[in-house]
Image (cartoon, rainbow, N blue to C red):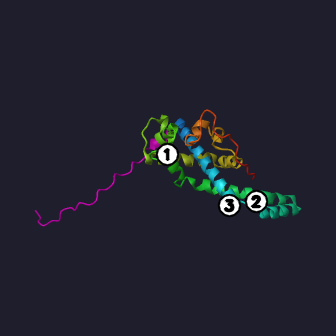
Amino acid sequence: EAKGGKGKGKGKEKPPPRRKAKASETRPPAAVARAQECELCGLVFERMEMTLSSTRAELALSKDAAERRQAQIDGVQKAQTRRWLKLEYAQNLAAALEDMVDGMCNGVGLKNAACKPEPTGEPQRWSDAALRRGGGGGGGFDKSTCEARVGARCSALVDAAADALQRAALDGRDATACASLLRGCSVETAQAFNHSYTPDGDAPPQGNAPKDEV
């Protein structure tokens, strides 16, 4: 037996590995997947509205600049050029929205919004959301699994409806549009993460945002 061997030093204990989502949790039954995409659609609309709002602020023109712009538009003789000048503002909004949608599935914004460990002060429907607990809202919450669901459903939603979502946002529609854009989606499900929504009809009316023509 060898003598003088060095004993194994005790290092810092490693944290437990993060739980990996099972395939069944990111590829659930069709009805559950539709509910999760519906919930995610509401979150996407919230972020599209924020993107449009911040972009409008960046593009806001002063009164003098607006008057100069209008004079430029009025001075253009060709109808096609005049129309292009009128649409330039809206096209900038559309470009900002497209950039946001293109990058949202790889970002952390949607995951952070849906997968808060303890959503203090939020309504019960938030905690019971299918993205958080799987089908039926009866499963336990696991942050890693929730984030995996958001990633999977985001990719599916973008593949199926990215253009329609952006068009609806530019038309001034809100998350209630999800019910008409996605199969099996209800307004209440789409509003799962909207803390100000009330199912009794007290939510802000659809279409109250400015419409941006493109």
Residue 102 left/right relative to 123 = right
Overall secondary structure of the magenta section: loop
- Label 3 sits on a secondary structure element that is helix
Q: Residue at x 66, y 38 (%)?
A: 180
Q: Residues within 10 Å of mark 1 (few under 14, many from 20)?
A: many
Say whether disc 3 or disc 2 marks the residue closer to the N-terminus: 3
Q: Give, as a single range, the part of the protein colored magenta.
A: 1-28
Query: As drawn, which residue projects farthest toward the top?
Result: 200
Neighbour class for label 3 at 10 Å: few (<14), some, many (≥20)?
Answer: few
Q: Are marks 3 and 2 in contact (CB under 8 Å)?
A: no
Q: Is residue 143 above or below residue 13?
A: above
Residue at image position (83%, 61%) is 70
Q: Is residue 168 magenta?
A: no
Nearer the observer, 115 or 199: 199
Q: Which residue is mark 2?
A: 88
Disc nearest the viewer among 3 and 2: 3
Tell me how far mark 1 sits from mark 2, CA to CA: 38 Å
Which residue is tagged 1? 149
In three-dimensional space, the C-alpha distance between marks 3 and 1, rounded to whole angstroms, equals 34 Å
Residue bearing mark 3:
58
Q: Residue at x 62, y 40 (%)?
A: 182
Residue sitting at x 78%, y 64%: 65
Whichever of callouts 3 and 1 sits on the residue coming sooner in the sequence is 3
26 in the magenta segment: yes
Quarter of the rendering occupied by the N terminus: bottom left
Q: Is residue 187 above or below residue 57?
A: above
